[in-house]
């Protein structure tokens, strides 16, 4: 079977990137977190509801998409895992279930060993449960994702909350010397337009580098973990890269990267973003899951269920030492994701760029974003 998280999450990430960057010059989200939360929902869906979720998750070619979704949850859980030393990475999945709601054996079996279940009393204490879920997610992300569920998101009609968090803190394999950081121009709208002054890091190291068709890309590996940040610098506006990302995927844009002695200038940056993903998912073809005819009969036959909200938040902070990144997604279900070095190159990231944090083996995109106005932490 194909590598479910790497192939499917990359495709979902490219789909969402086209939509989420239409009106936002600076943004970040986690395809892995979104996909994991939606995979949990797919594990309990049937009929048209399941078909649409499988399609948006790029699992529709699998003869048993629910089982593929469950396998993907387990694979994502272990991808790049580390805790302790110089790197921490974790991706917990949690399902809060209304006490007394009879859950099907098939749903429980699919989630076994991949998802932590917790009892909840949404009927009697919806606001208290919202506070508790937000507290758990904040704890899972070291306080970087707070208030994921806004006031009113949980009601007495809520029956399940499916949550997926991702947290990474890792040091660069080749840090940027702090003494090399200096104020430098950054051109959000091109070099013929006014510049911002930003703290620009600088350093030279042997790294994966690619000169592609209309862009440059560099891979910045982390220490003690098989993950790396990819920085993609378009020759022109970032919008020009979107069709290439949609057609070739992130892996296609990074294919062929080779070791170079890269002299790199990269701004420090910190980004936070929050989304209600239902409009984006509707544009990608998910409709039945949000309506009164939604079929989540694989979760329970005791009550008709539908998705009432899909909340997502993400955070990334990049400096001379490394990266801290976090994200969480909540789906609220209510009643009715040593070779000889080649020639040296120089890459100056002084205009809008794309970035991703990827698994070094599978290419699984944990985070994907765009920076046009870098703001340092």
Image: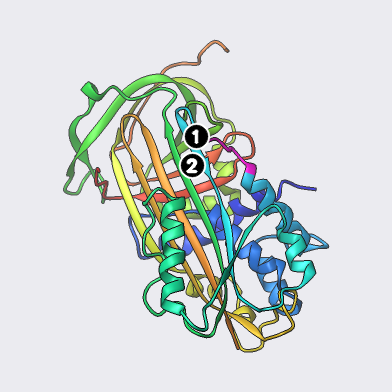
Whole-percent x, y for residue 237 in the image: 36, 50
316 sits left or right of 154 in the view: left
Label 2's element? Answer: strand
Seen at 69% across and 49% down, the residue is 74
Query: Image point 44% across, 24% down: which residue?
Result: 173
In the image, the segment drawn in magenta is 78-83
Q: Residue furthest top?
A: 340
When the figure is inspected, residue 132 is found, relative to residue 375, above or below; the finding is below
Quadrant in the picture for the C terminus: top left
Going from N to C along the chain, the mark reached first, 1 or 2, is 1
- Using the image as rendered, state which of residue 177 and residue 371 is in the foreground: 177
SS at circle 1: strand
Residue 224 visible in the snapshot: yes
Horizontal and vertical percent for residue 340? 54, 10
Q: Is residue 79 magenta?
A: yes
Colour scheme of this structure image?
Answer: rainbow
The residue nearer to you, when weighing 49 against 311, is 311
Mark 2 = which residue? 357
Dividing the picture into quadrants, the one containing residue 148 is bottom left
Location of mark 1 (residue): 228
Q: Are marks 1 and 2 in contact (CB under 8 Å)?
A: yes
Residue 156 within the magenta-colored segment of the rendering: no
Q: Is the stretch drawn in magenta largely helix, strand or loop?
A: loop
Residue displayed at 42% across by 73% down: 128
Toward which corner of the image does residue 252 lie, by quadrant? top right
- State the image coordinates of residue 322 (x, y, percent, origin top left): 38, 33
């Amino acid at each position: 079977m194909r590598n479910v998280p790497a192939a499917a999450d990359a495709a979902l990430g490219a789909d969402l990137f086209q939509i989420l960057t239409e009106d936002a010059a600076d943004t970040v989200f986690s395809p892995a977190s979104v996909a994991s939360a939606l995979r949990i929902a797919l594990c309990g869906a049937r009929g048209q509801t399941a078909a649409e979720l499988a399609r948006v998750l790029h699992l529709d070619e699998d003869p048993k998409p629910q089982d593929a979704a469950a396998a993907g949850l387990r694979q994502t859980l272990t991808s790049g895992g580390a805790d302790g030393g110089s790197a921490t990475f974790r991706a917990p999945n949690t399902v809060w279930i209304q006490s007394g709601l009879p859950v099907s054996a098939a749903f429980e079996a699919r989630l076994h060993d991949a998802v932590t279940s917790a009892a909840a009393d949404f009927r009697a204490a919806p606001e208290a449960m919202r506070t508790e879920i937000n507290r758990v997610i904040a704890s899972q992300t070291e306080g970087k994702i707070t208030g994921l569920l806004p006031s009113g998101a949980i009601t007495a009609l809520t029956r399940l909350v499916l949550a997926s968090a991702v947290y990474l803190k890792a040091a660069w394999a080749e840090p940027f010397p702090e003494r090399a950081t200096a104020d430098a121009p950054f051109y959000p709208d091109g070099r013929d337009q006014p510049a911002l002054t930003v703290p620009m890091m600088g350093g030279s190291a042997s790294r994966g580098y690619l000169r592609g068709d209309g862009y440059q890309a560099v891979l910045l590996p982390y220490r003690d973990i098989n993950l790396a940040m990819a920085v993609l610098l378009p020759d022109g506006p970032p919008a020009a890269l979107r069709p290439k990302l949609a057609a070739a995927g992130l892996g296609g844009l990074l294919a062929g990267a080779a070791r170079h002695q890269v002299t790199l200038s990269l701004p420090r940056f910190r980004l936070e973003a929050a989304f209600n993903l239902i409009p984006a998912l509707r544009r990608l073809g998910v409709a039945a899951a949000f309506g009164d005819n939604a079929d989540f009969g694989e979760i329970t036959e005791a009550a008709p269920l539908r998705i009432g909200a899909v909340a997502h938040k993400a955070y990334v902070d990049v400096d001379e030492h490394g990266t801290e990144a976090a994200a969480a997604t909540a789906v609220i279900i209510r009643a009715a994701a040593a070779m000889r070095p080649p020639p040296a190159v120089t890459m100056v990231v002084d205009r809008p760029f794309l970035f991703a944090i990827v698994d070094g083996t599978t290419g699984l995109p944990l985070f994907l974003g765009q920076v046009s106005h870098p703001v340092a932490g």
